[in-house]
């Protein structure tokens, strides 16, 4: 730990990260301070207008000869006012004598009201207050004389800054994305300017140590490292006494992290609102069932990804990784821009399909890049690098996309996504540059794989009762039903984005923990079953939840889905790897794994296609409940069929 | 060349971080500004709605008694009362369901007729260059449209507030960007500064090439390395050192 904190790279990143955080915090603090100051006169005038209207209505009754203490309907008046303006905290009518008990008081307890009246009032502290207004104990109190008695109307002073404070959630998302992006960029810069030259120098030093001087680093670096490398190259060339060949440091695997991040991030930006975006087009198209059409279009994206991947794998060996990735990123750019500008449902369908082709192509290019630039010894690290880029994008994309959609509109968000995909196309030549270590390419699924896999009964159980339900829950519930339900009850896109983000966070935190537990307990099937149950059990409760607590329950349910899947996925992969031959797994050619991934992707496509008609038939909340029942039933059946007690004791 | 490259690395690191920081600051500033704008609009709309509802109640009372709006003689007085109560108001209008003005009281020049774009809507809020307006549709006793109320206030106060906040955000954002830029420059300098273990390797290598080889300096140890690549490099150098010490020394001239 001491080593890492002492590292100039870590220190530099910490200083830069802290400064960025503080700068954004300062801007937000300025916004809240200025906002409160400039908005206060408006709040005061609004309060005065509301109090005046209430006064007129009460006075009208008093003029008719009704004594103020015998007025009827003051509670309805307060309810009506509060319905129109939620910032109104209380309404009170008092008699003429000071210190009298309030005749009518709504929204506040009498003891609190007395304390409030006893509190010192600030009138001159803020500009814009009328003579009749005071700031008392956190309330803006407007007191207007009635024909008999006084009317007091209280507004929550904090209500004014609440929207600005709420905005801090959006700013937190911006901070998170900016910090992660800065980290990714720095990683690439450091790798290109420091780690790669250092690696080349190590290769040259090893040649010298083995008595084979001659190769040079063929690279330039900065500062002390640069000075050392320059001397080393001269020494090595001189020692060999002949023109020296440069060692090829090879492509840096770090680049794949940023590339994976960019293409997934671009696609994830639309996640929190895609179903409602599509539904608008579907509803405007005659002779089309809007719900079915929406589910079909969202599911189509994932199905196209599954279908295109084998073809992209074939293209990989012909085009090479850079051109394949660039082509994919450009297709995704066109697809996302087309999604933003689509004129109708059928347009949108075509653009989403194009975007899916781009997604699949870039994915295969990244995967191939990892395979080419790693050996069997470090392939897992390479894949982890790619997966970490994808995970970060899964976390940041929906949250950031939600914020963008709420502020700038859904179409603009897709245009921003297109910009991200275009940026990825521009960066690929630099980030995937360098020589390949081996001539391996990603492998595509064949019919033989299916024949091998489907003869394997445990694998069929694994696919049908664990992998498919997990994917159906992910895409049907999280990608389709969560946005539909939450936007339907008036939540904003940014709120939906933050809730969807919880899944990625739960996976990020839970993944390593449960992977260690999987290895320790060695009862993989039990973890798969438990994970399936955890991810689905809360879904069953959703139809019984009232709208007021829907957002909180959604957060818990999405977190449970993330935790459940973090429990089951490592155990599932471990089990399937155990079913395949070790040699094929080491070569990355196990048909069991290839088929599992392929079927999972199709399952992902089917999720929204199943969820949409269910939601149309029974309602979105009930559809979630049905998904929960299906998930739980699958987990229980899986537990019955697959879970065996762990044998304890040494053999 | 080495020095130039060193500074270019610091510039690359600092520049990359600065671009990300500026983009984040712009985005945060824009989000905050939009939220301020939205809150301001909401307050204005709520305030105008209060008056519109009061006028609407008066109109609806007459309609319920069977009086068409043209015959409600008390309305001009009510409208004038509301206009007088709020100095920001420019215009209070009661219009027919077809959009024609029935009664209007105004302060200053006659306002445009914003309700014409919103006929048939139960309530609306519109912001134009010359004013902010709120409208309500009033349902008659038969459950169909009876009349409409429109209230317009000057946009001057709004434009003043928006300009004030825009200036504050601009200057505040620039100050924050300046402070962040300074801290990022420090971060880039920290990142680019000499590393102890690597420095010891470089010094020792230079001495070896100059023919001043001696015992292995105590400071030269992979343990002092602070990062993986540095540790690997020091270890590789220590392994190659005997061969380097025995090799040609012409390279020292560099």
Image (cartoon, coloured by chain):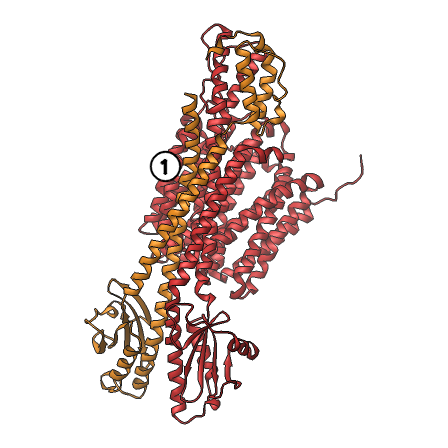
Q: Is residue A588 visible?
A: no
Residue A99 visible within the image = yes
Residue visible at 50% across and 55% down? A482
Q: Chain of mark 1?
A: A
| Residue A59 percent location from the top left of the image | 39, 87
Q: Residue furthest top?
A: A241
Horizontally, residue B29 falls left or right of residue A569, namely left
Which residue shows up at 35% across the image and 68% down it?
A: B44
Q: Secondary structure at mark 1?
A: helix
| Residue B46 vs residue B18, the one in the foreground | B18
Q: Position of residue A516 (x, y in %)?
A: 66, 40
Colour in which chain B is drawn: orange
- Rendering coords of residue A263 (x, y %): 43, 39
Q: Which residue is mark 1?
A: A330
Horizontal arrangement in the rendering, residue B187 relative to residue B164 (left or right): right
A67 is higher (above) or lower (below) than A254: below
Q: Quadrant of the N terminus of chain A?
A: top right
Which of B121/A587 is in front?
A: B121
Write down the colour of chain A.
red
Depth check: A208 or A99 in front?
A99
Image position of A368 with respect to A516: above or below: above
Q: Which residue is depicted at the point 55% across and 63% down?
A: A543
**Residue found at the very far bottom of the displayed protein:** A65
Residue A210, horizontal then vertical, whole percent:
59, 11
Circle 1 crowding by C-alpha within 10 Å: few under 14, some 14–19, many from 20: many
Q: Is residue A552 above or below residue A387?
A: below
Identify which residue, A423 or B209, lies in the foreground: B209
């Amino acid at each position: 730990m001491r080593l890492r904190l002492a590292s100039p790279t870590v220190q530099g990143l910490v200083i830069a990260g802290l400064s960025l955080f503080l700068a954004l915090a300062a801007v937000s603090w300025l916004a809240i301070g200025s906002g409160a100051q400039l908005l206060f006169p408006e709040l005061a005038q609004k309060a005065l207008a509301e109090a005046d209207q209430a006064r007129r209505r009460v006075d009208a009754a008093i003029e008719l000869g009704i004594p103020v203490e015998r007025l009827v309907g003051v509670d309805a008046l307060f309810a009506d006012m509060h319905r129109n303006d939620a910032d109104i905290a209380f309404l009170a009518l008092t008699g003429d004598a000071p210190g009298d008990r309030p005749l009518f008081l709504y929204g506040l307890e009498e003891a609190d009201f007395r304390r409030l009246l006893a509190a010192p009032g600030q009138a001159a502290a803020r500009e814009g207050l009328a003579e009749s207004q005071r700031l008392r104990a956190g309330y803006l109190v407007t007191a207007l004389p009635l024909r008999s008695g006084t009317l007091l109307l209280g507004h929550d002073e904090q209500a004014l800054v609440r929207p600005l404070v709420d905005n801090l959630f959006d700013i937190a998302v911006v901070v998170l994305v900016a910090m992660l992006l800065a980290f990714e960029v720095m990683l690439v810069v450091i790798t290109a300017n420091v780690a790669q030259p250092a690696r080349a120098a190590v290769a040259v030093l090893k040649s010298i140590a083995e008595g084979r001087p001659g190769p040079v680093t063929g690279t330039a670096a900065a500062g002390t490292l640069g000075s050392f490398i320059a001397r080393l190259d001269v020494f090595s060339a001189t020692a060999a006494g002949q023109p020296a060949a440069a060692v090829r440091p090879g492509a840096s695997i770090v680049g794949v992290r940023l590339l994976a991040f960019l293409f997934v991030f671009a696609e994830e930006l639309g996640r929190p609102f895609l179903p409602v975006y599509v539904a608008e087009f579907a509803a405007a198209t005659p002779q089309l069932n809007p719900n079915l059409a929406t589910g079909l279009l969202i599911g189509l994206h994932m199905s196209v990804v599954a279908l295109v991947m084998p073809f992209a794998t074939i293209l990989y060996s012909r085009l090479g990784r850079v051109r394949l990735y660039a082509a994919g990123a450009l297709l995704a750019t066109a697809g996302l821009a087309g999604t933003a500008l689509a004129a109708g449902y059928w347009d949108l369908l075509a653009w989403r399909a194009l975007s899916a082709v781009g997604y699949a192509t870039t994915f295969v290019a990244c995967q191939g890049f990892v395979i080419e630039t790693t050996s069997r010894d470090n392939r897992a690290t390479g894949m982890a690098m790619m997966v970490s880029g994808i995970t970060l994008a899964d976390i940041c994309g929906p949250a950031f996309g939600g914020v963008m959609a709420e502020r700038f509109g859904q179409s603009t968000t897709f245009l921003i996504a297109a910009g991200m995909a275009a940026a990825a196309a521009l960066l690929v030549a630099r980030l995937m540059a360098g020589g390949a270590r081996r001539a391996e390419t990603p492998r595509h699924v064949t019919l033989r794989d299916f024949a091998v896999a489907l003869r394997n009964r445990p694998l069929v159980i694994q696919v049908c009762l664990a992998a498919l339900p997990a994917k159906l829950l992910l895409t049907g519930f999280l990608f389709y039903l969560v946005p539909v339900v939450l936007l339907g009850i008036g939540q904003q896109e940014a709120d939906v984005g933050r809730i969807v983000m919880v899944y990625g966070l739960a996976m990020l935190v839970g993944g390593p923990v449960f992977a260690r537990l999987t290895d320790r307990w060695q009862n993989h099937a039990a973890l798969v079953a438990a994970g399936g149950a955890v991810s689905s059990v809360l879904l069953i409760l959703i139809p019984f939840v009232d709208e007021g607590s829907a957002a909180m329950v959604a957060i818990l349910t999405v977190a449970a889905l993330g935790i459940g899947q973090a429990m089951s996925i490592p155990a599932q992969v471990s089990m399937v790897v155990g079913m395949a031959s070790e040699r094929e797994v080491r070569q990355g050619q196990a048909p069991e794994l290839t088929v599992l991934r392929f079927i999972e992707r199709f399952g992902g496509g089917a999720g929204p296609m199943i969820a949409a008609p269910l939601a149309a038939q029974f309602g979105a909340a009930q559809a979630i409940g049905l998904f929960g029942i299906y998930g739980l039933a699958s987990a229980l059946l899986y537990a019955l069929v697959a879970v065996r007690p762990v044998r304890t004791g040494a053999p | 060349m080495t020095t130039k490259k060193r500074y270019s690395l610091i510039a690359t690191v600092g520049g990359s971080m600065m671009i990300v920081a500026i983009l984040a600051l712009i985005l945060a500033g824009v989000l905050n500004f939009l939220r301020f704008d939205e809150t301001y609009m909401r307050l204005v709309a709520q305030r105008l709605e209060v008056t519109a509802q009061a006028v609407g109640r008066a109109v609806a009372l007459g309609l319920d008694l069977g009086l068409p709006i043209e015959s409600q003689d008390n309305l001009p007085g009510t409208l004038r009362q509301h206009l007088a109560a709020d100095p920001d108001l420019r215009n209070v209008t009661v219009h027919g369901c077809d959009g024609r003005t029935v009664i209007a009281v105004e302060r200053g020049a006659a306002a445009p007729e914003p309700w014409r774009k919103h006929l048939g809507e139960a309530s609306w809020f519109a912001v134009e260059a010359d004013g902010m307006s709120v409208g309500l549709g009033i349902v008659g006793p038969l459950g169909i449209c009876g009349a409409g109320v429109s209230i317009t206030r000057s946009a001057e106060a709004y434009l003043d507030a928006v300009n004030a906040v825009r200036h504050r955000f601009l200057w505040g954002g620039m100050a924050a960007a300046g402070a962040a830029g300074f801290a990022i420059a420090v971060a880039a300098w920290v990142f680019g500064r000499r590393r102890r273990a690597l420095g010891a390797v470089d010094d020792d290598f230079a001495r070896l090439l100059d023919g001043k080889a001696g015992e292995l300096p105590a400071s030269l140890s992979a343990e002092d390395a602070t990062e993986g690549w540095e540790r690997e490099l020091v270890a590789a150098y220590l392994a190659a050192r005997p061969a380097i010490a025995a090799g040609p020394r012409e390279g020292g001239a560099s």
